[in-house]
Image (cartoon, helix red, strand yellow):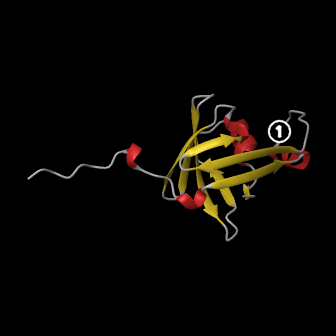
Amino acid sequence: GKAPRRPSVSDAKPPLDLNGTYRMVLTQADADKAGDPEDENYPLVETITLKDGRLEGGCFGVDGGTYSVDGDRITFHSIEYNADSTVSFTRDEEGNLDLEPVPPIDPGDAFTCFYNPWIKID
């Protein structure tokens, strides 16, 4: 007989319960605590929308990107920067995401994208 076809990465679908709009706010106190020497205009507000494997907004660039889920990890791909970032995640009862960068990751990207929880706003 013929062996069953193995699912490919493109066959994987992200869980629909991650769909939504999230907000992360960085303050000057966050930057000071993280040791970020740059002087930004804080607060810095990042709004990210996840929908069926596509992402828009936030630190991923104006072209958005994609995301995929494998267990307790999410890999985000920025189209503009042609870069991937993988994080482990937990979700609380309100749907907020706590994201922990998985090395290797640029420290600036880790701070700008994942320093504080993503609060689900929609």
Image quadrant where residue 88 sits: bottom right
Q: Nearer the viewer, residue 122 or 37?
A: 122
Image quadrant where residue 42 sits: top right
Q: Nearer the viewer, residue 1 or 114?
A: 1
Which residue is the extreme one toward the bottom? 93
The residue shown at (86%, 33%) is 38
The residue shown at (48%, 58%) is 71
Q: Nearer the viewer, residue 33 or 117?
A: 117
Residue wearing tag 1: 36
The residue shown at (90%, 49%) is 29
Binning the other alpha carbons within 10 Å of mark 1 as few (below 14), some (14 to 19) or many (20 upward) gives: some
Quick check: 109 left or right of 84? right
Quick check: 8 left or right of 44? left
Against 71, residue 115 (above or below) is: above
Q: Mark 1 belongs to which amino acid?
A: Asp
Quick check: 8 left or right of 84? left
Image quadrant where residue 66 sits: top right
Q: Nearer the viewer, residue 50 or 115?
A: 50
The residue shown at (8%, 53%) is 1
Residue 49: x, y in percent? 67, 48
The secondary structure type at the circle numbered 1 is: loop
Residue 70: x, y in percent? 47, 54
Quick check: 36 left or right of 14? right
